[in-house]
Image: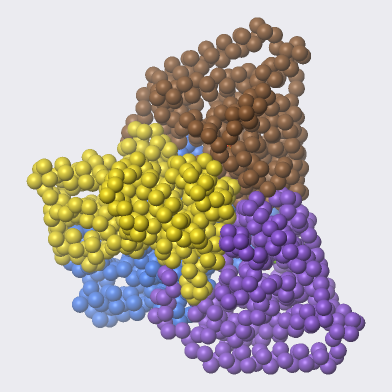
Chain colours: A brown, B purple, C yellow, D blue
Amino acid sequence: MDRSLKLQIYRNMILSRRLEERIAELIKAGQVGGFMHPGVGQEALQCAAIAALRRDDYLLYAHRGVAYWVARGIPLEKVLCDLAGREGGTNRGKGGVMRVVYPELGVLGESGTLGGCFPIATGAGLSIKVKGGDQAVLCFFGDGTSNRGTFHESMNLCAVRKLPVVFLCENNGWAVSMPTERSTAVRDIADRAKGYAVPGKVVDGNDPEQVYDAVVEALKRARSGEGPSLIEAKTYRLWGHWIGDPDSYRSREEVEKHWRHDPIPAFEEKLAKEGVLTDSMRSEIDAEARAKIDRAVEFMQKQPSPRPDSALEDVFA
Amino acid sequence: MDRSLKLQIYRNMILSRRLEERIAELIKAGQVGGFMHPGVGQEALQCAAIAALRRDDYLLYAHRGVAYWVARGIPLEKVLCDLAGREGGTNRGKGGVMRVVYPELGVLGESGTLGGCFPIATGAGLSIKVKGGDQAVLCFFGDGTSNRGTFHESMNLCAVRKLPVVFLCENNGWAVSMPTERSTAVRDIADRAKGYAVPGKVVDGNDPEQVYDAVVEALKRARSGEGPSLIEAKTYRLWGHWIGDPDSYRSREEVEKHWRHDPIPAFEEKLAKEGVLTDSMRSEIDAEARAKIDRAVEFMQKQPSPRPDSALEDVFA
Amino acid sequence: MRTITYAQGIKEALVEEMRRDPTVILYGEDVANFGGIFRITSGLKEEFGENRVFDTPISENAFVGAGVGAALTGLRPVVELQFADFLFTTGDEIVLKAGMWRYGHGGAYKIPLVVRCPSGAAGVGPEHGQCPEAFFMHTPGLKIVSPSNPADAKGLLKAAIRDDNPVLYFEHKLLYAAKGEISDDPDYLVPLGKAAIAREGDALTLVAISAMVPKALAVADRLAKEGHHIEVIDPRSLCPFDRPAIVESVKKTGKIVVAEESYRTLGVGAEIGAMLMEEALEYLDRPLRRVAIPDVPIPTATVLEQFVIPNEEKIYQACRELLA
Amino acid sequence: MRTITYAQGIKEALVEEMRRDPTVILYGEDVANFGGIFRITSGLKEEFGENRVFDTPISENAFVGAGVGAALTGLRPVVELQFADFLFTTGDEIVLKAGMWRYGHGGAYKIPLVVRCPSGAAGVGPEHGQCPEAFFMHTPGLKIVSPSNPADAKGLLKAAIRDDNPVLYFEHKLLYAAKGEISDDPDYLVPLGKAAIAREGDALTLVAISAMVPKALAVADRLAKEGHHIEVIDPRSLCPFDRPAIVESVKKTGKIVVAEESYRTLGVGAEIGAMLMEEALEYLDRPLRRVAIPDVPIPTATVLEQFVIPNEEKIYQACRELLA
Ligand SMILES: Cc1ncc(C[n+]2csc(CCOP(=O)(O)OP(=O)(O)O)c2C)c(N)n1
Ligand SMILES: Cc1ncc(C[n+]2csc(CCOP(=O)(O)OP(=O)(O)O)c2C)c(N)n1
Ligand SMILES: [Mg+2]
Ligand SMILES: [Mg+2]
């Protein structure tokens, strides 16, 4: 990773973190009614993985956080309008913040049922293959979601047809109140790759460089027609499952411990050591992020609600 | 395996083979209308695996052949009446030969959708565990069926809850016209066990002793609360997918080659060498099988059709 | 008599039936350690132990299908889906296995399974906000209940758990906090298949399902003030469906409005309309009115959601039209 | 004009549309090397290559869902299920993904997907013999067609492939060998949403779906000999549903019989009944009659199957009853 890439990832991590903090405030203040699964703690892997994509690749994100959209470059005000169910978002109030969509950048949208993403990603991979392109598909999903049958069917189908799909598991230790070790019978989800004879790799999800390198490698494999890969990024969900989660099912000690591995200060320290990030840059990046968010929130707040009877539109093309 | 067990398995293999030959004749002669997937070539593994069960264990068989029922001891005439849609079968004409059922021997029935068996087997395992018994569940399925999502979900659920289920894959090289190596991205389906941290074992499905030993071991593990196992028995489907299949999708050479590994003569030879089976016993066993089948066919032919309006019964308990 | 909430009614039913019958077990995602995302099952694991109350992986096919397998082999599983919409992820297990396993095997087995399905639009969009009862009402072999108040929530769930057939139990998310009176009888059961006349009247028959019932009762109040005494029928069970209750009412009133949170085409109102056309045509003096979702998925933004979900005003207008 | 079979009609539609548009692809179990278990697609892999015509593993969720993903990204996939019943194994992909992805994302994407579903009772029991159209007719976002003859089979499939929305295409197994005339126009399309008046008449309206249409026409012949000239309507599409065609006919005849291979409760006849009660109540002079499966799964033994499947005699009796 070169300097500018590192900074780009860092900027997106900061912007994502600040945006989620702001969204949490808005929700808690009752200013927007949206339903949000925060991604705090997982921004490193999300931003780094997406940084490895080409503009014409496809993206199936998971339900956790805003970093996917931030990193892919979807305007913040659009994300906020989706959250608030206003005009000016990406889905006309139809899907809320869970269904941010952006065809220009290959952002296909989200399945409300977990695991619904796998077959869709497979289909996007199929399109690429049938048309003979060299794009790829990046599909995020959680540790809990790795237990859906669609994971198995899609991994196998991608493998037998050598479809260019990178499956990226965000193993954050929990699926709502269910710890990974009780939901998932294997220590490393990456080992499931063995059932499909495809590469499976574990990386530290809080280290952007490890994630980036693994995704680059998997994308290369995909583009060259060798088929899918599975990457497991170990990370941790620092906040509750949703904004408002009582989070009563795990110990404060456990959560505290993981705050000490918050990827943002860790990456800052690293970048500082490498001379890539100075203190003043840091404050600048933070201030820039806040200013962007302020402008986006302001935009959102001025946007009207959708026309009520537009509820009847968009069923059929 | 002791002598009597070997002979029991051999007897069941012969009885199964003769019964299918007879069923094929009946179907081709238009005497019964049933829909049958013949198991010719796979009797060794089917009979040997079932021989390892206790009377109070549960069985989920697959759609291929009659050996499951023969080996489990379901009266032949019942199977034939199910095939012919007559009274005197096990399912009152409701389910045909695809849904032979026998509660007294834990034979739970069949799912018409492939892979529907896995969650049912899981549930039977759950029952055993909740009630604290030491029974086990044996669940057969094909190589093609190993690509259904229910396989993955059920393997994982059984593994995390340590349910006493033995999953036995009959890898017969084909799923209708789809060869295993094109449908299934892994060379040994048993390797999929690695995704659930459970034992996965490959055996020669045409060798009853290998199969029996593997199933005994897996059952032992199940009964002692250690959870599920996956066994892959390599075998071959010697006949078409169904009786009437043009079987145009594979070469005659391939089929011929596998006839040379037909498990019946191989087992005969072995038993003869071991002095377990003499020529006269062989003819006797064969004659016995034919006589049994004759009696069962005769019984079936005398049975009436179900009362038409009994179609309205059995929806609710 | 005590006053409890709908959520409490569900919980009491679970606790009482689990105490009564050791073969009743409860599982689903987050039901044990967390007490369920709607907090219905908190404390149950503590009382009944991890063998009978446990959390499952996110594997709806396996755990719903396992409910069928467990029911075939002597348990009475109560399975919680986090949202009723997830029934679609497990269509084979619900429709072909729970619904048809018994029939296909000639009645050899019973399937005493309950699947709890939190339903209803609540700002959560197309895949978390449906009332999909009508899909499954078309399936032979499934019983379906949709309680509208705490007493029915409890009595129907107890009856469902004791029933030897698979029951889809739809609990409307917006009713969890609703309060109502309930008897203290530990055998308080509401029989499956028996409609409630929620309010008697003779001017019009308003059939309302689940969360539409309180709205219907408010409409009935409003219309009473205007001099129209309508009858409100709450079917409670959609299978078995208490056809005579509706037919009898319409023979008296000659007018029918159906309020439901299903999609309009082939919603429950379609069956009611067809049934009346078969059995009570000569009594009908006005057209059928169906107040339902206008055949669009459920949008997320409140203003859109409220446009498509039946509300008091829409029900009122439909009744007024027929009473004119 | 040529005479072809229904199976040929399907095949010709596939071949013509694949020649016309390179984004049309075809896949499913055994469709490529074997030519499909009903032998509809033989030779297609040879003509269009393994990239566009291929066999899939037994993974209905993945390959149906992949159809949605491929449709979102610029292909027009035609996916074959071996039996329509398997739609239930892929409920999420069909109902929530194909049906609602577009809506949930505010219309950002089109989903030009066709799922071919061989339907109908044919001695194959509860999980291989259903006509499950009505389940999906309740789903917003899905188009549904059920051709009854070779010309419609071809014209509707061509129109479905060119449509920008997901279409469930139900092909009745017992119709594959049926013969009929067809135009040679390579753009012979049957528009989705337009019913056919299969036979004109004014004594009674008989709506018949899929394999019921030939039976209905035979009944019409028989009744004509008895002096009753009934109208037979074949909706062809169930979504969009040509409501005016039925309403207009009933305004003329005053009598309606619906013959279908769905389960009776909430079968297509329910929607027709309710619609008529809304829109044509004053024209109805006799009750609705629904000839459908009496809410039981489909049994396997012929004698049982024939007891529950509507046949000519049952349709005839229902008509006679209304004509009496
Ligand atoms: C099929 C399905 N089952 C359950 C849910 C409800 N649900 C939403 S998020 C979630 C937990 C997901 O866990 P994981 O995949 O680990 O992702 P994480 O939330 O940890 O990011 C659950 C159970 C759902 N949306 N879809
Ligand atoms: C979900 C589902 N998909 C497809 C089918 C149709 N089908 C029946 S048997 C079969 C092949 C099964 O292959 P395999 O599992 O290898 O078993 P084998 O037939 O070889 O014994 C297929 C595709 C089905 N019954 N269910
Ligand atoms: Mg997680
Ligand atoms: Mg096979």
Residue A94 point in image, percent of width and height? 42, 36
* Residue A72 relative to residue D203: left or right: right
* Residue at image coords 39%, 33%: C301
Residue C197 point in image, percent of width and height? 22, 56
Please tell me in which quadrant of the rendered image residue B234 appears.
bottom right
Report whether residue B290 is seen: yes
Residue A299 point in image, percent of width and height? 44, 18
* Residue at image coords 69%, 45%: A163
* Residue C324 relative to residue A74: left or right: left
Residue C258 point in image, percent of width and height? 26, 52
In the displayed structure, D22 sits above or below A133; it is below
How many marks can you see? 0
Report whether residue D7 is seen: no
* Residue at image coords 70%, 8%: A278
In the displayed structure, C218 sits above or below C76; it is above
| Nearer-the-camera pick, B148 or B33 | B148
| Nearer-the-camera pick, C264 or A98 | A98
Query: As drawn, which residue projects farthest toward the right?
Result: B273
Please tell me in which quadrant of the rendered image residue B259 appears.
bottom right
* Residue at image coords 31%, 68%: D290
Query: As drawn, which residue projects farthest toward the top?
Result: A280
In the displayed structure, D95 sits above or below B243; it is above
